[in-house]
Image (spheres, coloured by chain):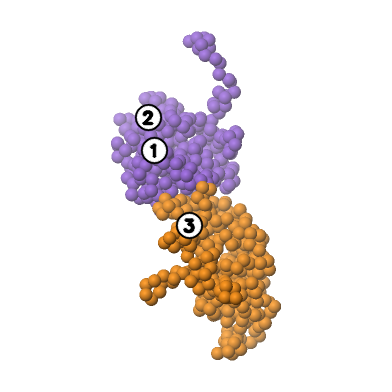
Amino acid sequence: MTAASTSSTVSAANTGAGDHFGFLDAFAKRELRRASFKALCIPGYQVPYASREMPIARGFGTGGLQLSLSLLTPEDTLKVIDQGADDSVNAVNLRRFILATCPGVAATTRTTAASVIQTRHRIPETPLHAGQIMVYQVPFPDPLQIIEPSEAKRRRMHAEVDYARLLVRLYEDLVRFREVAITNRYPARVAGRYVIDPSPIPRWDLPKLNRSHAIHLFGAGREKKIYAVPPMTTVEPLAFSDVPFQVEAFTDDEGGRHRCARCGAGDSYLDEIVLPDGGRRWQCNDQDHCDSHREESLR
Amino acid sequence: MIRMNELSTPVPPAAPLAETRLPIIAARGLTRIHGPGCLRCLESTGGTTGRNLCPHCRSVVAVAGVSFDLHPGEILGVMGESGSGKSTLVRLLHLDDRPTSGTAHWRGTDEGGHALEVELTACDAAQARWLRDRRFGMVYQNPHLGLNFQVTAGGNIAERLLTAGEGSFRAIRDRALSLLDRTEVPRNRVDHKPGHFSGGMQQRLQIARALAPRPQLLLLDEVTTGLDLSVQARILDLILEIQRRTRVAMIVVTHDLGVVRLLAGRTLVMRHGRVVESGITDQILEDPQHPYTQQLVSSAL
C-alpha cells in the first residue's frame, strides 16, 4: 500500500467531510495548547484536560497523540519511536495516522532532523537541541499513585510537597535489595517543587531531562492529564543525600561494560537479546543512534 | 530549710524558671458538637441530664467547655467511660478535628529553637501539618491507625523522619535502630513488617514512630487497652521511662484507673463531654468529690 492510499483511507474513514488539519477540531486543539502552556508555566504540575476520543484505544498513546496533533504545523518534521525503535507496531501506526491527518508534515527517523518527537519508553541518546519538542505517552501521570489510591488525597500531597512516602519506598528497597529497585518511572523532582512520574523511561534516560534544551510534554490520555518540563529546568531524581542516584551499569562478567554488538557503542542504553542457541547479545535500544554510530564507524 | 538552701546553692536565674512554668497547652472552654447544634444544646445535655444527645436538635455534644493547662514534662491523665469525649478531646488537640468553640493555645519552639505560640483552633492546614509532623506525636489504641502495615518497622519510623525533613539514609537507619532499642523492640525485627509483630510490640513500635521527630507533646489514646496485663505493665514502664528521659509532655487518655494512677500527675475525669472533676491524681483516687468519680473508684476497687 502506498503512502497516498493509506492517507486517503484513514482520513475518509475517520474524519469525514470537512477534514481538520491534525484530526482534532479547533476547540480541542485550543484546550490542549492552553493545558500545555499551563503545564510549562508550572513545571511538573499535572494539568487536567478533556482527553478526546481518538481512533486508537486509550492506553495506546492517545495522550501523546493528541499533544502531537495540537503541536504540529505543515512545516514540522516528525519522529515517532516506541522503545527506541522507529519501526515497531505502535510507532508505525501512530506515525501513519499523524501523517494522514497532517498534510505537509514530514516524517524522519533522524533525531537531529526532527522538530517533534513522540516517544514511548525512551529519550533518544542523541542530545536534544533547542526548538525540539519531546512528546511522551504516559500511562500513569501521578508518581503518588502507587502509595495513595485517592486522587483527592494525592492532590493534597502534591500541594503540601508531601513526598515522604515515596522516599519510604526507596528506603524499603535499600533495606531489602541494598539498592533502589525502581527500573523505570523513577520519580523525579522538577524545578525543586513537583515530583513527576517521567513515564516508563529507564533510569538511564532520567539525567537527560535535567537542564535539557528541548521542551518535554507528557500526555496521559486515559488519565486526562498533561504536564511538562520546560527547557533548562532542573530535574532531580528522588534520592537520599548519602545514597546517590545511579543509572544502569550494563556490567559484564569481567566487570567491564557490555558494548553494542551492532555498532560497538559503549555509551548507550542496551537491550539484552536471548539468541536461539541460548547465548546473549547486547544491542543499542535506540535504533537511530545505533544506525548513525554504525555509519560513522564504517565511513 | 529555705534559708539553708539559699546559702548552700547559687540562686538559679529567674527567667528560665518562669519560662518553664508557662503551660505547653492552655485549653479554654473547648467544645465540639457533632450535628447542627442549637442554643439549648449545652443546657440540655451533661450533668444531671445524664445524656450527651441534645433532645432539641439531635446533635451530639461530644466535648463541652473543657479547660486545662498542660505543663512541660507533665503527664496529664484523661479518664472516663466510653462516649465521655476523651478521644474527641485528643482529636481536637492533634488537629484532626476542629472545635465548635473554645481555644487551645500551644507554646513551644520553632525550627530554630525560638519560642513559638500557635492558637491550635485557628491555625491553617500548613501549620497543622507542621505541628503534627514535627511537634506532636500520637499513639492510637488501634495500631492500624498509627502504623503503615505495608512497610517494615524501620520504614514506619523512616516515614516520620522523612516527613520531618531528614534526608540521609544512614541517619534514618541509625535513629530507627536507637528508637527500637529505646522501646524494647528487638533490633533484628527492624526489617519485618508490623503485621508479623505481637500486639504489645506493635504498640511499642507505634510509640517509637511517634517519638521519631522528637515531639514536644505526646498524645496517647488508650494505648494499653486490649493488651494482657504483663504487656500493659511493660508499656506503662516504657512510657514512664520515656517521660523521665525526654521530659516530653503527655496526655494519656484511658478508662483504666490503674493507668492514671501509675502515669499521671494530674487527671481530668470526664463524663458526657464535661470535666466533672480535675486535680492531683492521688487526691482524686483517694478522696473523690464528684459522685461519678466516687462510683468509678469504688467500682474499680
Task: Look at the image and tell me in which quarter the C terminus of chain A lies.
Answer: bottom right
Mark carried by residue B261: 2
Same chain for mark 1 and mark 3? The answer is no
Chain to which the residue tagged by mark 1 belongs: B
Mark 1, residue position: B181
Amino acid identity at mark 2: Arg
Q: Amino acid at mark 1?
A: Asp
Chain B takes which shade in the image?
A: purple
Report which colour depicts chain A: orange
Residue in front for this viewpoint, B202 or A107: A107
Residue A208 seen from this side: yes
Q: Position of residue A96 (x, y in %)?
A: 57, 82
Residue A257 in the image: state x and y as whole percent.
48, 62
- The amino acid on which the numbered mark 3 sits, given as a three-letter code, is Glu
Going from the N terminus, do you reach mark 1 or mark 2 first? 1
Q: Which mark is residue A148?
A: 3
Q: How many marks?
A: 3
On the question of residue B62 being in view, the answer is no
Q: Residue at the front extreme? A: A299
For residue A58, side relative to residue B234 (left or right): right
Quadrant of the snapshot with the N terminus of chain A: bottom right
Pointer 1 with pointer 3, Cβ within 8 A: no
The reply, left or right, for residue A184 in relation to residue A227 is left
